[in-house]
Image: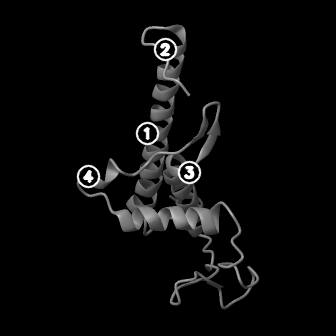
Amino acid sequence: MQKPTEGTERWFEVARRQCVDHLRALLSIRMAHDYMNVILGNFENCHSLVASGLHSASVIAYGRPFTPTKTKIGKVAYNIAALKRVEGFDRQLHAHLLEIRNRLIAHADYDVLNQSPGSSSGMDLGDGNSRLTRPEWSSGGSC
């Protein structure tokens, strides 16, 4: 696709769309941060169902900018190249969040979900060590 001439209506529309996309990405990251702050700020008193829902929402919100999305100009996803240079960026945590988003939260990856959800022994997370078990829901507390 040819780059539009600066100052044209088409150029403005492309620039506006990119600006909106960047703001949406920033909002997603901010939402993920806010959800985690609610959980961590009220950890002792946070109801497990609320914490579980906020955790899922946080992982989905964080992964949104890095997940390919169909647009009028094709599939778009943020590259982490610039993030690698930011102090405190944890590439391993980033990859882990995207993996649990893609394999556990947003999609039912049957390689991970190799047992029935009601199984008391939980679900194998595929790393040879970890299992996801159904939490015992408490009736008290809130976030």
Q: Is residue 77 left or right of residue 133?
A: left
User: Is residue 45 shown to the viewer in this render?
Assistant: no
- Type of amino acid at the residue the image marks with label 4: Arg
Indicate the amino acid at tag 3.
Answer: Thr
Q: Is residue 55 visible?
A: yes
Q: Which badge, 3 or 1, is on the more N-terminal residue?
A: 1
- Binning the other alpha carbons within 10 Å of mark 2 as few (below 14), some (14 to 19) or many (20 upward) gives some
Q: Residue furthest top?
A: 8
Q: Residue at x 44, y 55 (%)?
A: 38
The answer to which of 72 and 124 lies nearer the viewer is: 72
Please state which of the two labelled residues, at mark 1 or mark 2, is closer to the viewer: 2
Q: Which mark is residue 132?
A: none
Kindly indicate the quadrant of the structure image that contains residue 71: top right
Disc 1, disc 2: CB below 8 Å?
no
State whether residue 108 is above or below residue 83. below
What is the spatial separation of the Cα atoms under label 3 and label 1, in whole angstroms?
A: 14 Å
Residue linked to disc 1: 26
Say whether disc 1 or disc 4 marks the residue closer to the N-terminus. Answer: 1
Q: Earlier in the sequence, mark 3 or mark 2?
A: 2
Secondary structure state at the residue bearing disc 3: loop
Q: Amino acid at mark 2?
A: Phe
Relative image position of residue 58 (x, y in whole percent): 51, 55
Q: CA distance from mark 1 to mark 4?
A: 17 Å
Q: Which residue is mark 3?
A: 67
Query: Residue at label 4?
Result: 85
According to the image, label 2 marks what residue? Answer: 12
Secondary structure, mark 2, is helix
N-terminal of the pair, mark 4 or mark 3, is 3
Sort mark 1 into few (<14), some (14-19) or many (20+) by Cα contacts within 10 Å: some
Q: Secondary structure at mark 4?
A: helix
